[in-house]
Image (cartoon, grey):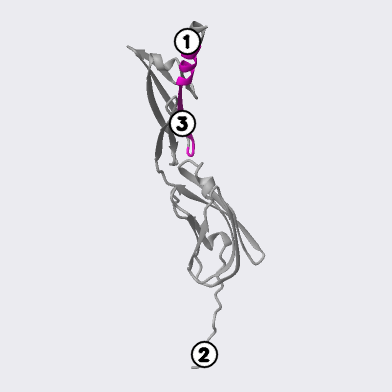
Amino acid sequence: HTGTQTDKLVITMVKLSDAFKFYAEDINPDSTIAKVHLQSKYGDALENISLDVSSSFFTLKESFSLTPFEDKVFEVPLNEEKIKTLLAGPYIIDGDVKMNLLSLPIEGLVTFTEKPGIETTKSSTGILLRVYEEVKSNKGNVKQEVTIATSKNLFASLFTRINIEPSIKEIKGVRAYYTFRKQLSPNESLDDRVTTNWWILLDVIVGIILVWYF
């Protein structure tokens, strides 16, 4: 008995939303690039794809093709000035994937990992016009409270000017103690500058001598 064999053509319909996996790797404050992934979840090659993505860290526009199950990785330069002001945590990435005449909005998350970091600089200049400066800067990406403490003897404090109002001012014995506190966001600083002007005392002494002389 001779039969007739019939071949069947199987067509699988896949939604565009089910054809891709979109995600980004974690970013830290020392990063210079972001790694963004678009992975094909489909067993055939995909042609004429364009990707347009934006976030707080970067923008990305690319046209490309994908082989079956390929994980395409894009290395995108970061906006390094912008990320200095961002707090740690999750951020939304959104954009569009287009293929031929089809368009798909996509959304993902990127985690900006925590990195605390307070940088302190100190300087002292001058003799008769003596300037002491201490600066604490938040170089990390989490909010941090900083404290600067300084003191002067009561006589010197008569000729001393401070650029910011102290959080606490105390007098103990013959010294005045100043404490400065501030909650710093990323890229913010607390700048304490103490200026003691002994020229004022010198002018007073010279004035008294001249008055006495004349």
Callout 1 touching callout 2 (CB < 8 Å): no
Image quarter of residue 183: top left
Q: Amino acid at mark 2?
A: Gly
Q: Amino acid at mark 3?
A: Leu
How crowded pointer 2 is (Cα within 10 Å; few <14, some 14-19, many 20+) is rated as few
Q: Is residue 102 above or below residue 106?
A: below
Residue annotated with mark 2: 3
Query: Who comes first in sequence, dot 3 or dot 1?
Result: 3
Residue annotated with mark 3: 190
Q: Residue at x 37, y 21 (%)?
A: 151
Q: Which residues are magenta?
A: 186-207
Observer-nearest of 31 and 189: 189
User: In the rendered structure, does residue 187 fall within the stretch colored magenta?
Assistant: yes
Residue 64 lies, in percent from the top left, at 57, 68
How crowded pointer 3 is (Cα within 10 Å; few <14, some 14-19, many 20+) is rated as many
Query: Who comes first in sequence, dot 1 or dot 2?
Result: 2
Spatial CA span between label 3 and label 2: 90 Å
Residue annotated with mark 1: 209
Residue 203 lies, in percent from the top left, at 49, 16
Residue 5 lies, in percent from the top left, at 52, 87
